[in-house]
Amino acid sequence: MDDGDLTRRRDGALNVRADGDDTSAHGGRARSRDRVLGRIFDRDRDAVADREPRLPDRAGRVAAAKVEAVAQVPDANGEEDVATPSIERDDDAAGRARAPLLDERELLEVESHGVGTVASVTIRAAFFDVGDTLVEHWAGRDVTNRIARARICAALGEPAWIDDLLAAELEPVGPASLAQRIGQRQSGTRFEPESSRQETEAWYRAWFEGHGVDLDGIELDRLRSLMCVPLAEISTPVPGAFDALRWCSRQGLRVVLVTNTLARGDVEVLEDWKRFGLQDVLHAVVSSHSAGWRKPHPRIFERALDMAEVAPGEAFHVGDNLVADVYGAQQLGIRAIWRRAPRLVPPSDERGRPPDAFDASRSACQHPSEHLTLVGDEVVCASCGRPAEIDLTPDSVIEDLTELPAVVGRWIGADERVT
């Protein structure tokens, strides 16, 4: 595969389209399971091939939400009350430059109720991070490497370079963390770090060339896929995660997985969720490998919005990383629910980068996003104990996914019970 092929193939998103969903008066849904089409889309959003496996069909219906105004502020003359939506805050408004939460597509109805107002907003999509949001308790790197080695050897024999490759850190590490880059960004601009560009196969190619390995006969895309150890073998579900996905699907929300990965592409991500038996609740998956950008870059979230066919204010995102998930989503106007994971340093990819890969000394700590947590309303680095220069507040905080229906149920006016 040449570099042109790599570029053309990496920026896809796997979508699961509907073929005649029908919702009964009781909220049930009859799904068409016979004709399903998975597609990889190029950067211009055109279908480039019907080359992906056929997938279970999902298309969400619309669920209406009511967002209550919780504050009134006087106008310039002090004569009227102006409602301030509860989900809208000024988190460094000049610097964040988020899209308005209620635009002409989202503001469906405003009714006067005395001195306040109630804005009826449609929530149509639920985005989820994967690692330490839906699954956790990762196996050690020795376990994941052993499984990956067996997969590669079964397919390719036993290459002389295999153990060196499994031990390698393929992803480039920049001189500054994402948290530091946010603090350094120019006021009034979107945070679009070039360091979030992902070129997985180019990284593989560079490693082989750097180690003097002849690439003849090595199909990099196949090797990349073989490196993807099934999630079911190296992690366990976060409490309530699978029930939360099913609950969102029953509410008619379009469920999209938005995940940073190293080797996993959209197809491999979907295969994981087929193994979990949850492919029927997914509308689409968007991996950083296939999108070509990692969270918090806006492009991966914009791809998820495109796949769900919703505006930013019509979606919420659930994730465990305050920078990648909360900051990344909120700068586009997507509501963010932070899952406070008990593990402060989740793996940076499916093979699990160890915590000591970062310099966590107090004097040199760069506040990597994997180490950031909330102490009260302040973002603090758990490694050095110092505040990080980031101003953000999640729209909601949960400890595990059993709490999600109560949070989202208030937004969409749905029954919060998980059945």
Image: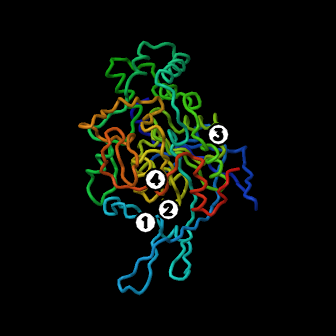
- Mark 3 to mark 2: distance in Å? 31 Å
**Measuring 27% from the left and 52% from the top, which residue is drawn there?**
185
- Local crowd size for mark 4, using a 10 Å CA cut-off: few (<14), some (14–19), many (≥20): some
Given contact means CB atoms under 8 Å apart, are the residues at marks 3 and 2 in contact? no
Structural crowding at the residue carrying mark 2, measured as other residues with C-alpha within 10 Å and reported as few (<14), some (14–19) or many (≥20): many
Which label's residue is closer to the chain start, 3 or 2? 3
The crowd level at tag 1 (other Cα within 10 Å; few <14, some 14-19, many 20+) is some
The numbered mark, 3 or 4, whose residue comes first in the sequence reads 3
- Pointer 4: what residue? 302
Q: Are marks 3 and 1 in contact (CB under 8 Å)?
A: no
- Outermost residue, left direction? 363
Q: Which residue carries the number 2 mark?
A: 313
Q: Earlier in the sequence, mark 1 or mark 4?
A: 1
Pointer 1: what residue? 100
Secondary structure under badge 1?
loop
Disc 2 and disc 1 in contact, CB within 8 angstroms: yes
Residue on which disc 3 sits: 54
